[in-house]
């Protein structure tokens, strides 16, 4: 799943040790700017410190995520876990291509009375 959101806050990283090794979790709060009342979503990044370091407060990103739930001692906990984050470029900041404009197609000529297109260059 994906959503577009503006970074509101980047929380400090939390690290720990498990049977699988050292882990790092960091939460980033995004605001969905296109919602009527401004919905916030806290997104968890697991072992993605470099990606979080590239995020900037106030910038808009396209966040790809999965929703995961787990049961711990009879209570359910749900995480929104990001697996990819891409910056969103607005029309005002999008790079302008250096490509020349498209040229019009040359007019084709028809053979006399036959209705066949003559597009041979000689």
Image (cartoon, rainbow, N blue to C red):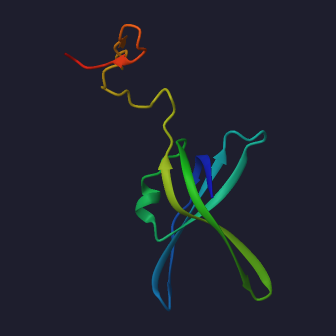
Query: Image height check: is 92 above or below 110?
Result: below
Percent coordinates x, y for residue 49 in the rendering: 44, 64
The single residue placed furthest to the bottom in the displayed view is: 19
The single residue placed furthest to the front in the displayed view is: 113
Percent coordinates x, y for residue 79 in the rendering: 66, 69
Percent coordinates x, y for residue 7 in the rendering: 57, 48
Q: Quadrant of the N terminus?
A: bottom right
Percent coordinates x, y for residue 38 in the rendering: 73, 43
Drawn side of residue 104 relative to residue 29, left or right: left
User: Which residue: 35% across, 11% down?
Assistant: 111
User: Which residue: 51% across, 33% down?
Assistant: 90
Query: Image height check: is 113 above or below 97?
Result: above
The single residue placed furthest to the left in the displayed view is: 122
Q: Quadrant of residue 44?
A: bottom right
Closer-to-camera residue (117/54): 117
User: Which residue: 71% across, 71% down?
Assistant: 78
The single residue placed furthest to the top in the displayed view is: 112
Query: Image height check: is 46 above or below 63?
Result: below
Closer-to-camera residue (79/57): 79
Query: Image height check: is 103 above or below 13?
Result: above
User: Which residue: 55% across, 41% down?
Assistant: 58
Q: Quadrant of the C terminus?
A: top left
The image shows a total of numbered marks equal to: 0
Drawn side of residue 98 relative to residue 10, left or right: left
Drawn side of residue 70 relative to residue 2, left or right: right
């Amino acid at each position: 799943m994906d959503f577009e959101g503006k970074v509101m806050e980047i929380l400090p990283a939390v690290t720990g040790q498990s049977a699988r090794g050292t882990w790092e979790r960091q939460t980033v709060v995004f605001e969905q700017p296109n919602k009527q009342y401004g919905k916030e979503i806290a997104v968890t990044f697991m072992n993605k410190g470099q990606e979080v370091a590239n995020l900037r407060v106030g910038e808009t990103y396209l966040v790809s995520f999965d929703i995961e739930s787990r049961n711990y001692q009879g209570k359910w906990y749900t995480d929104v876990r990001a697996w990819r984050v891409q910056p969103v470029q607005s029309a005002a900041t999008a790079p302008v291509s250096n490509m020349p404009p498209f040229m019009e197609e040359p007019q084709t000529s028809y053979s006399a009375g036959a209705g066949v297109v003559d597009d041979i260059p000689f």
